Amino acid sequence: MQVKSMCSILGLVALLGATGLYAQETAAPSVEGRLLQILRTRGVIDAAEFTELSSLEKQLRESAELEQQVSGRVEEMVAQMQDAAPKTSWKSGKGFNYATADGKYSMTLGGRVQVRATHDGIENAADKLNFAAQRVRIWAEGSIFAPEWKYRVQFDLSGDRVTAGASTSSASAAALREAYVEYASSPALNVRFGQFKTPYSRQWLTSSGSQEFVDRWVGNGQFTQNYQPGLMVHGAALGEKNDLIDYAAGVFNGNGLNVQQTSGGDDMMMVVGRVAVNPFGAVKYSESDFAGGDFKAALGLNAWTMNNTMLMADDCSIGADITVVGHGLYATSEFHRRTFADNSNDRVGFFAQAGYFVDPGVVDVGLRYARFWVDGATSGLDDTTELLGVLGYYIEQHNVKLQLDAGSVSVRNIGGAGDTDEFRIRLQAQIIF
């Protein structure tokens, strides 16, 4: 047979095979092979032509199968590489996340910017207007080696607030707020080692970025002990969701933020403990009720004690807090008493605040009353009272918001010397990314 005729027949065979006129079983000859057999049986091709065409058809089929196998393997390898590649994502308020496919390593980078304007109208004194980058925080957190091993580092680039006099001023330096590693063996037992917040006072443990008012109540710093280097165990247990009780207990240097022991051994060591009960389910450490669900409540008790070498006396504080949240309402109150061994200059304070979403999730109004005083003091600060109202506009919950609070802050010194009455207005904008 001429080459042209053979090519025409083979082309016809290939075309018929491609149309799928015959079903092909795994063990049966190919469609093209069966067509060649039919052509031979009907005398269209002779035995030699059948042998030649069958050999060519086999070569073409094997080449196609090899190409298909290679293509399939390439697709499989690409899929495996994609599955094994690190995953990246971003979530508003949670930052940029980078994680390996096996879940052993992860890192989330995020930050927060708070800018504030404050107007102080002080009786018998000149009014003051100040602007501040109140908090500029960046953090990195995640896991390493296994999901149970966690870490967190946080810097405040704005540092601590400083004041400037007529001829002198001081610079504000960036401060390390948090730096710790944690082993989370279960919801009920986690061990944290490094520098972080001492577990005392619900409002202190609630991030400054999640406050309903522009900032915490006026007496907060008199009882809480800031960030401290130390060791802590914490967790949550009982109930259907392991959230009936949450607790924390730890031992800390007691010297404050980024301060190590320099002398005296453990003279300043501070022991802190907190337990909170959530009878209707966990209450998040975040102010304002965005969920608008059924009412929940939380009751907390906390205490710390240490030998304060600077005051030459044992120093301890106890406190209780209660919080109710639901149907757009968020209300919380705390009471604290800090005492010394000689019972001099004991400090007492409390606050109560409540807020309600008049436009669910968007516009919030609230009121706070707070008071702090010193028992038995012979000089210095005696009594401070704060009465504030707040209007909050939430664009994306706490992640993007504007807050305006205003009210009076009155200070009464012993003997009446240095008393001040201040009407304060604060406007704050915040972005968490």
Image: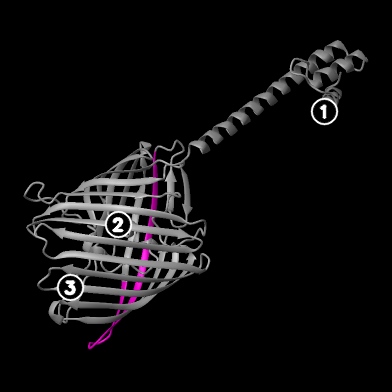
Q: Amino acid at mark 1?
A: Gly
Which comes before the other along the chain, label 1 or label 2? 1
Q: Position of residue 281 (x, y in %)?
A: 45, 49
Could you tell whether 205 is left or right of 96 in the image? Answer: left
The question of residue 40 being in magenta is answered with: no
Q: Which disc number belongs to residue 382?
A: 3
Most common SS among magenta residues: strand
Query: What residue would you read off at disc 2?
Result: 320
User: How dense is the environment of label 1, judged by Cα within 10 Å: few (below 14), some, or many (20 and up)?
Assistant: few
Residue designated by label 1: 20
Question: In this orientation, which residue lies closer to the viewer: 128 or 308?
Answer: 308
In primary-sequence order, the first of circles 2 and 3 is 2
| Display colour scheme | one colour
Is 28 displayed left or right of 403 in the figure?
right
Residue closest to the far right: 42
Magenta part of the chain: 105-132
User: Which quarter of the rendered picture does the C terminus lie within?
Assistant: bottom left
Do the CB atoms of the residues marked 1 and 2 lie less than 8 Å apart?
A: no
| Quarter residue 20 falls in | top right
Q: Is residue 44 above or below residue 418?
A: above
The percent position of residue 188, horizontal first and vertical second, equals 36, 39
Categorize mark 2 by other alpha carbons within 10 Å: few (<14), some (14-19), many (20+).
Answer: many
Numbered tag placed on residue 121 in the rendering: none
Asked whether disc 2 touches disc 3, contact meaning CB atoms under 8 Å apart, the reply is no
Using the rendered view, name the quadrant where residue 411 is placed.
bottom left
Which residue occupies 52% across, 60% down? 292
Instruction: From the viewer's perspective, tell me whether residue 202 is left or right of residue 345.
Output: right
Q: Secondary structure at mark 3?
A: strand
At label 2, the amino acid type is Ala
Q: Residue 216: tell me if it is visible.
A: no
